[in-house]
Amino acid sequence: MNRKLYGIIMALLVAVGTIFYVMNDRKDEKVNIGKSDITVEDGRLTPEVLWSMGRIGGVATSPDGTHVAYQTTYYSVPENASHTVIYVMTDKGENLKLLTPGAESESSPAWIDDNTIAFLAADEGGVQQIWSVSADGSRRKQLSFMEKDVEGFLFAPDMSRVLMVMSVPNPLVPEKPYADLPKSSAHIANDLMYRHWDNWVTALPHPFIAQVKDGKVGTDAIDLLQDEPFESPMLPFGGIEQFAWAPDGSKLAYTCRKKSGIDYARSTDSDIYLYDVESGEHINLCKLPGQDDMNMGYDTNPKFSTSGTYIAWQSMERDGYESDRNRLYVMNLVTNRKWSVSENFDSNVDDYIWAQDKNYLYFIGSWKGCMSIFAVDLDGNIIPQSSDICDYNSLAWGSAKRLIVTAQSMTNATEIYSFDTTRGMAERISHENDHIFAQLDQIKVDARTVQTTDGKEMLTWVIYPPHFDPNKKYPTILFCEGGPQSMVSQFWSYRWNFRIMAAQGYIIVAPNRRGLPGFGQEWLEEISGDYSGQCMKDYLSAIDDVCKEPYVDKDRLGCVGASFGGYSVYWLAGNHEGRFKCFIAHDGIFNTQQQFVETEELWFPEWDLGGAYWENDNLNRLSAYRESPHLYVDKWDTPILCIHGEKDYRIIYSQAVSAFTAARMRGIEAQLLLFPDENHWVLKPQNGIAWQRTYFAWLDRWLKD
């Protein structure tokens, strides 16, 4: 639901180091899907062209920084499948080589030494294992021989041990509650968090440590959470970034929220633990005796300094507030002193890396509609490094004080860049989709300042169609952001893609309304408990302001959004005073009372809605319930398309069904699009095309015909 959580998400799934690929539904078939040579007709970006793009994922640099390995995923719409491969090149973008040309997907590159890359691939039995290959593609060999899938790995710096993520059965939610009924599909739950995101939580990811001898991983791996019903990394989005080895390999830092059941469902209190590989001792760094700050919110993603004297991690202050400011915390492991070095940065730290030779850090932070690069020392002095209008998404060290980063924008998909820290300049070194973008008509993106109803200034992105002519009038779309606390940054999405919307002849208005990070904590927190308040006024201020332009057709306005953006659409449908001619809501909240008891992560509605609707007269006292979108259906008068995934356990698909039913009972033109096999997103190629076609057909019907 929250794009700070899964934004880092979107960055996430398509751009930064998390592993994502849609598995081929026909597992017995091997489909070798590679780089597309699609021809673009008339310079127009279409859904088919969008899905033909290669999507760059995890990026890793060699220890000496001179080479880069990265994964790219390609999709086939006819096969409804994907294929992930690994490339290697120099840190200047030269000598590009495909390392994994086979039909099986191979992913998660990580350097063992300056000439050897480890990665994940299936063995002959279909079990995912750790493999290695030389940077020239030779000497490919299998390193691990586990009985279950290795879902992630991290070698110790001295190569004596390896951390592996493997799943174990969840004793609290058994996959088969009755052993003598193996074909039964029954699930039994006795406590909360029995399902999460899009799965029943019948298995838990656990960290295992195994010794490495003669280049092979031992099979006698030790489970660091043996017999404990906890997750590490944390579901649903956590990966290998939640672990870190000390430089001498003697200790491992890991992220864990040691809670289960209702305690897990209501709390965001995760911690950083330090595991001693010799003694087996676990130390909670966030809650050492005698410390004033017990780090009660999310604490994730530890990284040791080069010397090993310090460890850093990302930290939120308040338990239950998943959208709290993400601070950059540092601990001196000699004195046990810990502190935030990002207090002077009034926004989120989304990724970071230690400097190679000194005790300071570089981080990516959300600021003024972009994900930018900053430097900070241990005293909290912050120096901006980048000024580009883009989203930087990941950081690694190249050679000669250059960072290897990924970046994207509203006009360009993710690519890899070399960022010169001495000059603050980025140079692109990957060219995954150049052959496609060279065929596309260009669009224009403007940053517009809009005055809000309470006298403040709001950054609003305005995206214009190709060949924009200010003497013509264009249908215009108001885009409502999700999250709710997720900045409208320079993100590139393969569904909510502004460039493809503009290519269909629409102007898009995308305001950074109240409740988004990057504009100070006060601006961010004005949305909690006030979904229908100032943030909705901000939406209307943005569309009204842009409508002053002569090229905007005020009689052909649409309003679209997903997640909280879907809530926004449902609410505005009853409160838009005739502005819009059609609405589209994807995975949105229609009934806040339903949402409170239907969602799986209870900390979210408890914080953002204000509490349970049956307590403290909340049903009448809190605006979240008193002004729920479903209570304004009597004012609905505009066609609406309701979209939802039936495997979305964050916001249940009954919300869309209810909204669609209400609209039709009111006699309003409506359409319902459901995906039985999709979650909060739409991830399968043919479903993605169906989504785009339905989306644009609805807009065209009401705003063009």
Image (cartoon, grey):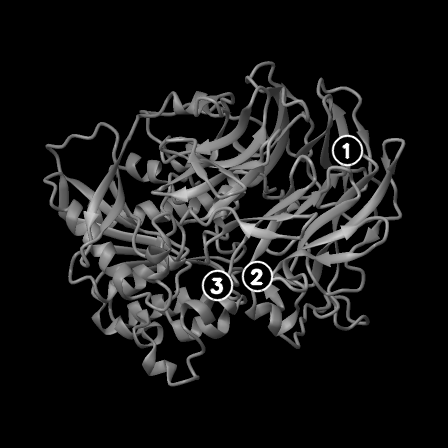
Nearer to the camera, 307 or 414: 307
Name the residue: 31% across, 69% down. Answer: 629
Residue 368 placement: quadrant: top left
Q: Amino acid at mark 1?
A: Trp
Q: Amino acid at mark 3?
A: Tyr
Q: Amino acid at mark 2?
A: Asp
Q: Earlier in the sequence, mark 3 or mark 2?
A: 2
Q: Could you tell me residue 595's position as x and y percent?
A: 44, 70
Name the residue: 18% across, 58% down. Answer: 453
Q: Is residue 565 visible?
A: no
The residue pinned by badge 1 equals 131
Q: Could you tell me residue 318's position as x and y percent?
A: 50, 63
The answer to whether residue 263 is above or below residue 542 is: below
Q: Earlier in the sequence, mark 2 or mark 1?
A: 1
The residue pinned by badge 2 equals 293
Query: Which element carries disc 1, helix, strand or loop?
Result: strand
Q: Label 2, label 1: how many angstroms apart (C-alpha)?
A: 42 Å
Residue found at the very far top of the displayed protein: 95
The residue pinned by badge 3 equals 321
